[in-house]
């Protein structure tokens, strides 16, 4: 009597709730149930009301919607032969009490889709849901719980057909109580014609007296899992067969398949298939097999772990766990160093290295603040790395390995912080320096350093930015490895379209080394100057070992060039045929004059044989103004192109003009306001307290176009003690 009274009370509460919803207009247009109605059917445009689910299901002959209004009962055996959508719109989770004989049988070509309903039963009875060729789908809010099954009962029994669970569905606290036939506390799959599509939802707290605490799959039955499907806390009395998902299959291909990303945890046991290297699941090619392995556990043998096969198509049992160390995004920008942007999608990462390693093709990594690289990073995709004006430094001998991918750098400062070793390594991939990108302060003297940027068989493009103040102190023996202070390209290509490489040190080339059959293309405002060997000799760029430089457009920047260690070609650069044919003689001359030989201290001049144009060192011209060389065993003679008497390299710099000098702080800082200076000029500022002893306190870089405006403020800090009251500035001629 107590149980009946509780159920009657629940029915009254649901009736009251139904009346309340009716008064608020929930049923205003579609449904207007009577006081005793528990559900209705909707077929086409016709709605029919029922006071009993048993009567309702006895009359269904067509595809229909069954809408439940309040808590009710089901006591009959229902045969579902059509498509039935069974749900509650007004009371999510509204309870349907199953009396002992109640059962829903889904027959061939029929489909029962359940959502927002909860099924319970007070006493032990056979399976309440039996699939015989059709489909049962549990959707959002569908729950089967607190069932005690007798005989060979299960919560859901699939003789043939498909059982499907989606996100938000639940099977909980169900028990297959018969000791001999207690197989599968929640789901029983009878054999080869039985499928379980575990695409979401949760099976928990279920038990069986024999095998498969949650799911028992008889020989040949198939299970597919994905998404947020979870099975946990399910038990079977037989310790050898405890767990969530049990397959009674001892040979043949695995019948478990993972068809989508899996976020839930599934315990798996195969009868007779728990040996090392035994395969137990098939994995769809779109699925990260390693990530799935961290979600699957062998509940029969805790010493075995899931691992992907070499081709990633199956899962195997191994003696070592697979660790998923894929970087995980943060919920928001708090504590993030970088973000990955793909259209409107933004993901934040605690470490910039994490963002770089997970970014996919076409995505953009943006630095959110100054950060440090404390481990090597592999770039797996073709991405853009935007520093957003921030600095990425490193705390040890670590590098960014581009490999065969593509990395484009923009608006960032890469600071080696004085640490040893190359900073960027490219193998068959590509690296691009865009505007406002700076690489500096990379130092080292180890034999494997090579250069701050090393390109093996790939491409390096410099469209702007700077490489400066990098030092490679390793001095190889003659004939040893080619090294440089900034860039080495081997068996690859370099595109110098702009930017500056300056104040770097390397033994074979202070700036750039192009060797081993490489080609460098030059145009635009690319400048390489003031780079040297460790001994102090100027050496900006070396071309060697069947490599060459090709000018493809007007050259504006200075290119200090030495044509190679013991080289004797006397060729500074080749000239692209289309450029040579379209350029005026004066433009060719102007471009050639941008090349200066670091050793001979001479400039290049253009020569042609009518088909081919070269830039050669002026000292290589004969008395007749011709250049003669042997290329591929053939002697060729080139005529010099007349060049002007005035070289256009340098811009004379006017005296520096102060408009205001203001002392600040403790007499060790001055704010100096200047008028605009000539573009390309460089100034050094000196201070003195006696007009005799002058101390250099500040040096500007080359004042590039657009960087000097009226009333710019320069702040100088002097470490010397004393009251500096006298100032002067020296200007050096600027090089265009």
Image (tube, rainbow, N blue to C red):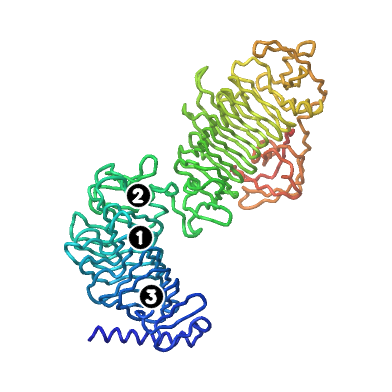
Cβ atoms at labels 2 and 3 below 8 Å apart:
no
- Location of residue 115 (image quadrant): bottom left
Mark 1 Cα shell of 10 Å, populated few (<14), some (14-19), many (≥20) = many
What is the quadrant of the C terminus in the image? top right
Q: In this rendering, is residue 613 above or below 377?
A: above
Q: Can I make out residue 407 in this image?
A: yes
Label whose residue precedes the other's in the sequence (3 or 1):
3
Front position among marks 2 and 3: 3
Disc 3 marks which residue? 93
Cβ atoms at labels 2 and 1 below 8 Å apart:
no
- The front one of 392 and 631 is 631
Mark 2 Cα shell of 10 Å, populated few (<14), some (14-19), many (≥20) = many
Picture coordinates of residue 286 (x, y %)?
Answer: 45, 48
Front position among marks 3 and 1: 1
Q: Is residue 253 left or right of residue 492?
A: left
Disc 2 marks which residue? 293
Q: Which residue is drawn at the image coordinates 60% and 28% (left, top)? A: 512
Picture coordinates of residue 633 (x, y %)?
Answer: 65, 10
Look at the numbered disc 3 and give the secondary structure of its residue.
Answer: loop
Q: Can I make out residue 325 in this image?
A: no
What is the quadrant of the N terminus in the image? bottom left
Picture coordinates of residue 135 (x, y %)?
Answer: 38, 63
* Numbered circle sitting on residue 87: none
Q: In this rendering, is residue 205 above or below 468?
A: below
Alpha carbon separation for disc pair 3 and 1: 26 Å
Give the residue furthest to the left.
179
Disc 1 marks which residue? 161
Q: Is residue 445 left or right of residue 175?
A: right
């Amino acid at each position: 009597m107590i149980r009946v009274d509780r159920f009657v009370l629940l029915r009254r509460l649901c009736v009251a709730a139904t009346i309340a919803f009716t008064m608020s207009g929930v049923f205003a247009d579609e449904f207007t149930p009577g006081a005793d109605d528990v559900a209705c059917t909707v077929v086409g445009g016709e709605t029919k009301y029922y006071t009993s689910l048993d009567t309702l299901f006895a009359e269904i002959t067509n595809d229909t919607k069954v809408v439940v209004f309040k808590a009710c009962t089901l006591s009959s055996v229902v045969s579902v032969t059509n498509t039935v959508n069974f749900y509650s719109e007004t009371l999510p989770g509204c309870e349907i009490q199953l009396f002992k004989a109640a059962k829903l049988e889904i027959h061939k070509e029929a489909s029962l889709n359940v959502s927002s309903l909860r099924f319970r039963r007070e006493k032990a009875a056979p399976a309440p849901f039996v699939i015989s060729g059709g489909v049962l789908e549990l959707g959002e809010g569908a729950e089967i719980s607190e069932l005690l099954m007798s005989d060979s009962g299960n919560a859901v029994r699939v003789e043939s057909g498909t059982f499907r669970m989606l996100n938000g569905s639940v099977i909980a606290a169900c028990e297959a109580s018969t000791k001999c036939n207690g197989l599968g506390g929640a789901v029983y799959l009878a054999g080869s014609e039985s499928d379980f599509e575990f695409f979401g939802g949760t099976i928990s707290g279920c038990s069986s007296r024999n095998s498969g605490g949650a799911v028992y799959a008889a020989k040949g039955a198939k299970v597919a899992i994905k998404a947020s499907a979870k099975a946990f806390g399910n038990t079977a009395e037989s310790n050898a067969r405890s767990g969530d998902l049990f397959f009674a299959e001892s040979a043949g291909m695995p019948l478990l398949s993972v068809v989508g990303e899996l976020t839930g945890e599934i315990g798996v046991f195969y009868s007779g298939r728990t040996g090392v290297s035994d395969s137990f699941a098939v994995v769809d090619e779109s699925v990260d097999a390693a990530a799935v392995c961290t979600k699957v556990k062998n509940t029969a043998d805790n010493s075995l772990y899931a691992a992907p096969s070499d081709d990633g198509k199956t899962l195997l049992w191994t003696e070592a766990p697979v660790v998923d160390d894929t970087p995980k995004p943060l919920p928001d920008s708090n504590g993030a160093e970088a973000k990955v942007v793909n259209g409107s999608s933004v993901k934040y990462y605690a470490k910039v290295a994490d963002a770089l390693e997970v970014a996919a093709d076409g995505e953009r990594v943006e630095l959110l603040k100054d950060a440090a690289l404390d481990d090597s990073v592999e770039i797996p995709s073709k991405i853009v790395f935007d520093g957003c004006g921030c600095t990425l430094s490193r705390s040890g001998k670590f590098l960014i390995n581009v490999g065969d991918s593509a990395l484009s750098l923009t608006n960032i400062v890469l600071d080696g912080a004085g640490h040893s070793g190359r900073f960027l390594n490219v193998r068959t991939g590509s690296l691009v320096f865009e505007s406002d990108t700076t690489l500096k302060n990379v130092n080292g003297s180890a034999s494997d350093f090579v250069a701050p940027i090393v390109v093996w068989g790939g491409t390096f493009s410099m469209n702007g930015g700077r490489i400066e103040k990098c030092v490679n102190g390793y001095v190889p023996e003659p004939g040893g490895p080619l090294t440089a202070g900034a860039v080495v390209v081997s068996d690859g290509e370099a595109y110098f379209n702009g930017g500056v490489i300056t104040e770097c040190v390397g033994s074979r080339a202070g700036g750039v080394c192009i060797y081993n059959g490489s080609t460098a293309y030059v145009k635009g405002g690319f400048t390489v100057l003031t780079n040297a060997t460790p001994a102090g000799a100027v050496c900006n760029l070396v071309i060697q070992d069947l490599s060459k430089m090709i000018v493809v457009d007007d050259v504006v920047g200075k290119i200090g060039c030495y044509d190679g260690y013991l080289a004797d070609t006397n060729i500074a650069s080749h000239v692209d045929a289309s450029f040579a044919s379209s350029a005026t003689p004066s433009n060719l001359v102007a471009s050639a004059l941008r090349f200066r030989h670091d050793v001979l201290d001479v400039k290049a001049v253009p020569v042609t044989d009518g088909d081919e144009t070269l830039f050669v060192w002026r000292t290589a011209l004969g008395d007749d103004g011709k250049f003669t060389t042997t290329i591929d065993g053939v002697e060729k003679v080139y005529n010099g192109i007349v060049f002007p008497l005035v070289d256009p390299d340098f811009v004379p710099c006017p005296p520096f003009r102060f408009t205001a000098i203001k002392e600040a702080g403790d007499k060790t800082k001055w704010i100096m306001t200047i008028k605009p200076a000539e573009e390309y000029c460089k100034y050094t500022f000196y201070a003195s307290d006696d007009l005799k002893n002058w101390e250099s306190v500040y040096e500007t870089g080359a004042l590039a176009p657009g960087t000097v405006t009226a009333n710019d403020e320069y702040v100088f800090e002097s470490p010397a003690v004393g009251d500096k009251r006298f100032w002067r500035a020296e200007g050096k001629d600027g090089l265009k």
